[in-house]
Image: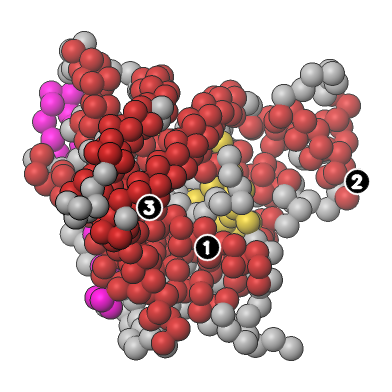
Amino acid sequence: MSQQIDLEIPLGKRTHLYRFFEILPGLLSFMFLLLPIVLALIDPLISAIFIIIYIITYIIRAIAVAARTLQGYRVMKEAQNIDWRQRLLDLQNPHEALKKIGYTSRLRWHEQEHIHNLQRLSKKNDHPRPVAIINVVIIATYNELYETLESTIKTVIDGSFPARQIILVVAYEGRGPESTQHAAQALVKKYRKDFLMATAIKHPQGLEGEVIGKGGNIAYAAKKLSKKLVKEGIEQDNVIITTLDADNKPHRSYLSYLSYEFIAAEKRHNRAYQPLALYLTNIWDVPAPMRVLATGNSFWTIINALRPHALRNFAAHSQSLRSLQQTNFWSTRSIVEDGHQYWRSYFSFKGDYEVVPLYVPIYQDAVLSDTYLKTFKAQFLQLRRWAYGASDIPYVASLLFTKNRQVPFWPAFARLIRLIDGHVSWASGAIILALAAWAPLIFATDASRSLTAHALPSFASRLQTVALLGMFISVFLAMKMLPPRPARYKRRRTVMMVLQWALMPVTPIVYGSSAAIYAQFRLLTGRYLDKFDVTDKALVTESGDKIR
């Protein structure tokens, strides 16, 4: 009989194995950054071959990303147009629903999946019924405005899923300002009648073994709610929990779509459900570099939704209450509790776990503070926190390379390699693409410089122009995804939305690579990030004033 594994990140001193894998991503990133220089000192030709191969590999990836982005956008638009509420109601009686559906020879992907689900469920007939599903929405807040919280709550109420089957939890921090506590309690009191249940739960500060972060807040709230559900006699197998940040606006079909996929899943409690995170709500208001980054991050979530084998929990996501109880809810020791929750669940379910993509968005704000300088700093802090997901590398390795391993080795090893590759590429890729072609010319000795060294920068530049295809697609889709232009902006603002993409070669280095290198350096030196830096997301009024 296998022993129960410890799902927690270690506190204090690490084992030698754990420290090795904490050091590894930073070490590999610095090695890749230095490799073109080292090779140039040895032989400019070898360095040039390495750089050309790297650029060609990048171009192939860029073409694939462009194709995936177009495909993902099309799938997202289709999913948004589906009546998920009706699809969900069909699961109440799958046999009767099949009789009403007209069969044609040409069915869309989602129509084929729906018919397949109805056929399978009608045979077993042991699935939970839609009327029994309870959706819990936990809104985590630290210092957000009353207006921000209220807007999110209204979005949940106005969705297609019945609010009388929704439990609202506003999870606020005891270390936060009193204004947020008053806002949470006032909003719960105001909207309690609209929900099955509504409550505000205060997360005490200074609990032992917790880092300062969102994980402790939502875990504490979910545990408190779980006890309350037992007292109320609510069937916990039918409860799904979705975590939202205070500025998140779920698509009106999200909870219906989520409930549909939960019921249709064969192993519904061994799954997480991941929507698309689109950072577009305030996109007209933020500075140009933030717009480029926000749009790029939105595309990244769309692309990943089409790669279920690589999909991980990110930002807002959903799991069943039973699934969360299996892992003792979210980690209270990580500032990246969303992505880390995937690995906790993966090892807890012994590898029999995956993330189901939901192709509708949860809209979020891009980073915005009350000055440009504060906005630029806040953006770096947000990306640094995301990049600190490299801390999952030693966590995964420690549970993989152990006698008490409880997951199949090779599938888990492949996941570890993808995890390492993703973080190393994040830190080094943009810098190598932008600067490495100059290494043979600058660092090779005079005697060893050759025609290759002089020609490489120009040749590399021509190669990289092929990747502009991806940028043109990004510009096209970014314009199509824009929310309506606010009346406070004139038409020339739209022109700036196109011209901003000239920053595309710069932002991945200034923000992406630098944030990843910083996070990995903290891991390498053992100076761990133990505080969740709350991202500034100011509100802009119709008059153009900013409110923090």
> The C terminus is located in which quarter?
top left
Q: Which residue is pictured at 48% across the width and 39% down the height?
A: 61
Residue pushed farthest top? 491
Q: Is residue 349 above or below residue 373?
A: below
Q: In this figure, which residue is indicated by the disc labeled 3?
A: 46
Based on the picture, tell me whether residue 545 belongs to the magenta stretch: yes
Position of the N terminus by quadrant: bottom right
Crowd rating for badge 3 (residues with CA inside 10 Å; few <14, some 14–19, many 20+): some
Cα separation between marks 2 and 3: 62 Å
Question: What residue is disc 2 on?
Answer: 123
The magenta segment is 525-548
Nearer to the camera, 63 or 520? 63
Mark 1 or mark 2: name the one nearer the start of the chain.
2
Q: Quick check: 264 left or right of 379?
A: right
Q: Of the residues shown, which amino acid type is indicated by label 2? A: Lys
Magenta stretch, main secondary structure class: loop
Q: Residues within 10 Å of mark 2 (few under 14, many from 20)?
A: few
User: Which residue corresponds to the image point at 18% horizontal and 59% vertical from the top-left?
Assistant: 177
Circles 1 and 3, Cβ within 8 Å, touching? The answer is: no
User: Counting other residues with Cα less than 10 Å from the Cα at mark 1, is it few (<14), some (14-19), or many (20 or more)?
Assistant: few
Residue 327 occupies quadrant: bottom right
Magenta-colored stretch includes residue 413? no
Q: Secondary structure at mark 1?
A: helix
Q: Which residue is mark 1?
A: 417
Residue 410, given in percent of the width and then of the height, sits at: 66, 68
Give the percent coordinates (x, y) of residue 67. 53, 29
Query: Between residues 73 and 170, which one lies in front from this camera angle?
Result: 73
Q: CA distance from mark 1 to mark 3?
A: 26 Å
What residue appears at the point 36 percent right and 83 percent down from the top-left corner? 11
